[in-house]
Amino acid sequence: MQQVNLGIIGGGTVGSGVYEALQHNGSLLASRIGAKVVVHRIAVRDPKKKRAAQIPRSLLTTDWREVVFDPQVQLVAELIGGTTTAREVILAALKSGKPVVTANKALLSAHGEELFAAARKYGANLHYEASVCGGIPIIKSLREGFVGNRINALYGIVNGTCNFILSRMKLQGVDFAAAVAEAQRMGYAETPPDLDVDGHDAAHKIGILASLAHGFWINPKKIYTEGIRHVTPLDMKLAGQLGYTIKLLGIIKKPAHGSCVQVTVYPALVPNGHVMASVNDAYNAVLVRGDVVGDTLFYGQGAGKDATASAVLSDVADAALDLKFANKHRVPPFVPHECDSSVAPIAGVFSEYFVRLDVLDKPGVLARITSVFARNNIGISHVLQPRGREGEIIPLVLMLHRAPNGAVTRALKQIADQPLLKGKPVMFRVENFQ
Ligand code: NAP
Ligand code: HSE
């Protein structure tokens, strides 16, 4: 049987998972693809470090060049993360004509256009299934399964750490900092975890999915991004009373008319009756709406050693098959198309809203607030005001009808400019998946 030598750069959570999975399932993989994948060399920073997998010291080196430029290494997996050395590693491997597998969404988000151009130039594929949604084969599904569809909408819970934190806060009453620390211990979080909690990791992933779905590389600076730091137990409770759960959602929507695509990441209220509200812990879910297929839903472990290793192995198998048959994928990993489109500015994006205003309970306050929304042509669909005593500060919740983000931001600023509130207005968008 043909042997394919794999060089791995990075032996941390994901690298160890890949090594271990190949030890357990290497023979199965070989019998399925007709090629034996052998780990030839692994680059790490500190060879003495204790690792999740028992990697023989003889395989380890601290110099990634010894792996990439080893003539026996035919295929390279970049699993170190970051955007500097990782970029160098991938470009060097591609230039040597070696296919690359990466789990690095931050790098693809920042330099994807350059890296895929290099892959085309040097005739070596760049595979990236593990970069989005851990074990869920969402890249392959979009690229191959839905190749005959226009993607009208995609909604994703794509960050395992944030979903884990929000679930622990809502279901177990754990506080934010403790939930972050737990996600770090479980190996879900990025280094630093701010990449997760501030929404950047989700933006990297949603940008990759949007680029794949719409054929032009999305500049990450154009993705409107909010994280979950401002989601409080009080808002979770109030949203719950209205029948909603708060989730960090990545959204890609192409309106029927116009060429702009909504590409956003923010915490949103999701109806409890919708399946996305039941996605908990480090699980991810992606709802893809294709014009031919209709709605499809993907669910699975979105982060962690084994789920991510599974995605890396799927790419390793594809690359090994390419090497075995000396040809390239029928549907290449990323091909630019429909490049005339662009990302919609947030001010023009429409949605519904949950607004919490901490106000003094006294006559006339509600009237003054509702008049601001009326002046901005924004309708109110529901009001929730917990019973309080006159003169007390109470949380006033208003649910707003569909309106552009720009109008709602303007109205909230006008309300905040009046001496009516204690603290700043709190606003979350509501997503009904229509
Ligand atoms: P990690 O646990 O921090 O591991 C990083 C590994 O890279 C370590 O083994 C480290 O060596 C090695 N390394 C760092 N710089 C190096 C250098 N210059 N030369 C050689 N080795 C170097 O990170 P991870 O969680 O495995 O993540 C790796 C990648 O997968 C990242 O792009 C991440 O975004 C992505 N990813 C992670 C997950 C997840 O759940 N963790 C899921 C999907 C994608 P030492 O071990 O000696 O320090
Ligand atoms: N930090 C990422 C997450 C890892 O929590 O989703 C998986 O990409």
Image (cartoon, rainbow, N blue to C red):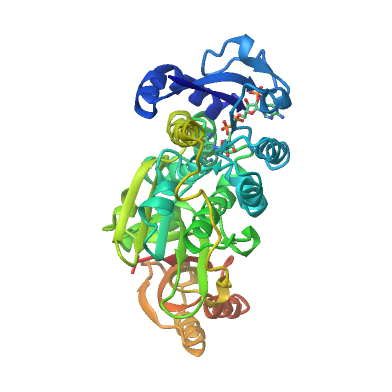
Q: Quadrant of residue 83?
A: top right
> What residue is drawn where x is 58% and y is 62%?
223
The foreground one among 254 and 68 is 68
Image spot of residue 151 (x, y percent):
40, 64
Direction front: furthest residue: 326
Q: Quadrant of residue 39?
A: top right
> What residue is drawn where x is 66% and y is 50%?
111
Position of residue 33 in the picture relative to residue 19 (left or right): left
> What residue is drawn where x is 46% and y is 73%?
361
Q: Quadrant of residue 353?
A: bottom left
Image spot of residue 76 (x, y percent):
60, 31
Q: Is residue 119 above or below residue 422?
A: above
Position of residue 194 in the picture relative to residue 433 (left or right): right
Label total for image = 0
Q: Quadrant of the C terminus?
A: bottom left
The foreground one among 100 and 372 is 100
Image spot of residue 386 (x, y percent):
37, 66
